[in-house]
Image (tube, grey):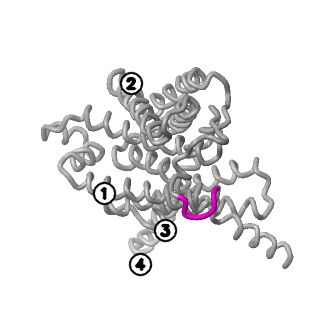
Amino acid sequence: MTEFIQTTFSTFYALIPVTIAQSLIMGFVVLGIMLPFRVLNFPDMTAEGAFPLGGCVCTVLIMAGMNPWLAVAIAILAGFIAGCCTAYIHLRFRIHTLLAGILMTTMLYSINLRIMGRSNISLFGSDSILDIIPVADSGSPWNKIAIVGALLAVAFVAFNYFFKTEKGTAMRAVGANPDMSEAQGINVWTATIVGIGIAGGFSAMAGALMVQSQGFGDINMGLGVLINGLAALMIGEAIIGNQTVFRQLLAPIVGALIYYQLISLCLAANMPPPDLKLATGLFVLFMLGLPSLRGGRRRGSAPGRESMRERPAG
């Protein structure tokens, strides 16, 4: 047993830099999930389609010889358009947000396959933004950590500022109460479409960074992204909270870092990879149901106390 624990933690320790690099990339996805769910009150599944969309667009453009920074920018634009389309489908046709996201993700699968021309493309030997500023030896995960961490920090600072501006406050108001926001002269359509578009851009950026990190693009790379992102968001909010804009933006990043370390620990302990999906789903179910269980316990105990107090003497 002692040998198993030592082997598990030695393997886990060796994987920490690689896992941190991956979790920072996935932090953009979790931000893209948090924005619709928490800020706009718009449960959305577009992240599962926008993530591979960004990866496919970036892969094809880099293989065509385009500068990787410009390829990432175009991938972000593609994700932004996908998010805007989801919001427009919901607003224009009055389709539920989840169904609009499912429809968009379904259509994006075919679009991604058209973009790539085949199911996967290798990027080994191609230029990458993750190696432009060498912090350590070539191919070291610390290069990825430094560059992706800097990009994530810029996004965090920019949106922490944005959500405190008039337009950012208006977007948050739409998520809190769209009817009251409209009565105050806020354009609900614009705020919703732009907000979901930004979320799609975040997810697409993560996809563009991921293909450069792993060295290939695949149209199936988005499978499970949404549930993993929700799990990371639950962890982050449980630790950081979401009472302020600062915490709301920090929670997805912290959650992604912790969640993927937990996944790495499970793999180091020789958990079969197919079981990770089950474990993730059960964990998200537990985190989502925990407030209800606590509330039910309090409600269940209160009537008993009340009945004892109200019971007549004798």
Q: Amino acid at mark 4?
A: Ala
* Residue 137 visible, this angle: yes
Where is residue 310, by image quadrant?
Answer: bottom left
| Circle 2 residues within 10 Å: few <14, some 14–19, many ≥20 | many
Q: Secondary structure at mark 2?
A: helix
First-in-chain label (1 vs 4): 1
State if disc 2 and disc 1 touch (CB < 8 Å).
no
What's the CA distance linking mark 2 and mark 4? 63 Å
The answer to which of 158 and 50 lies nearer the viewer is 158
| Circle 4 residues within 10 Å: few <14, some 14–19, many ≥20 | few
Residue under the image location 78 percent in, 69 percent down: 8
Reading the image, the residue beneath label 1 is: 160
Image x and y of residue 117, in percent: 63, 21
Q: Amino acid at mark 1?
A: Asn
Q: Amino acid at mark 2?
A: Ile
First-in-chain label (3 vs 2): 2
Q: Secondary structure at mark 3?
A: helix
Tell us which disc is closer to us: 1 or 3.
Answer: 1
In this picture, is 254 found above or below 31?
below
Main secondary structure type of the part rendered in magenta: loop
Tell us which disc is closer to us: 3 or 2.
Answer: 2
What's the CA distance linking mark 1 and mark 4? 59 Å
Reading the image, the residue beneath label 2 is: 89
Does residue 169 appear left or right of residue 89 in this picture?
left
State if disc 2 and disc 3 touch (CB < 8 Å).
no
What's the CA distance linking mark 1 and mark 2? 28 Å
Residue under the image location 63 percent in, 57 percent down: 138
The tag on residue 313 is 4
Image x and y of residue 19, in percent: 63, 60
What's the CA distance linking mark 3 and mark 2? 45 Å
First-in-chain label (1 vs 3): 1
Q: Quadrant of the C terminus?
A: bottom left
